[in-house]
Amino acid sequence: MPAILKGWIDRVFAYGLAYGYRGEGNRYRYGDGGLSGKRAILSVTVGDRITADRIAAAKEAWRIRLKGLFEEEPIPFRPQNGGDYPDGHVLASHIAMGETGLTAHVAKTRNAAGD
């Protein structure tokens, strides 16, 4: 996002809600802060050279995505304070071994057998 927008989010929206919660700095980031239990969705625009047909297809895909938004299961990201990030920032080396990128930060759910 543009720096001016990030600055606004940091100053107006995020501080005290998404971080800085309860005056604890970054201790309550991610799923532990003021946004705990809330849903979020990102909308990013790209493709200044997109055709009219592709614009129509993108609008339809977005409409369908929004229509089912509250029926979808949220992505279960690992909480910052659940023990997977011992220093509060870096994923422990024994967690998600062999995984990289965003998927390493998604918590795996266990089945009824505990696997």
Image: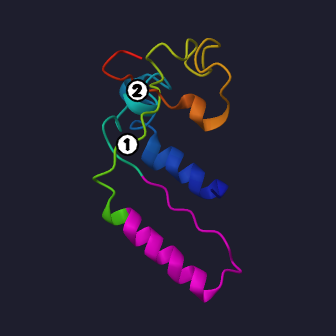
Disc 1 target residue: 74
Which corner quadrant of the image does residue 17 belong to? top left
Please say if 45 is above or below 2.
below
16 left or right of 52 in image: left
How far is the residue under mark 2 from the one under mark 1?
12 Å
Q: Amino acid at mark 1?
A: Pro
Q: Quadrant of the C terminus?
A: top left
Disc 2 target residue: 109
Label 2 environment density (alpha carbons within 10 Å; few <14, some 14–19, many ≥20): few
Which secondary structure, mark 2? Answer: loop
Q: Amino acid at mark 2?
A: Thr
The colour scheme used to paint the residues is rainbow
Q: Quadrant of the N terminus?
A: bottom right
Asked whether residue 51 is drawn in magenta, I would say yes
Which secondary structure, mark 1? Answer: loop
52 left or right of 79 in image: right
Please say if 45 is above or below 92.
below
Label 1 environment density (alpha carbons within 10 Å; few <14, some 14–19, many ≥20): few
Which numbered disc, 2 or 1, marks the residue that appears first in the sequence?
Answer: 1
45 left or right of 113 in image: right
Extreme left residue here? 71
Asked whether residue 52 is drawn in magenta, I would say yes
Residue drawn at x 45%, y 49% as measured from the top left: 12
Q: Magenta span covers which residues?
A: 41-65
Q: Position of residue 62 (x, y in %)?
A: 44, 69
Q: Position of residue 24 (x, y in %)?
A: 43, 22
Which sits in the foreground, 63 or 3? 63
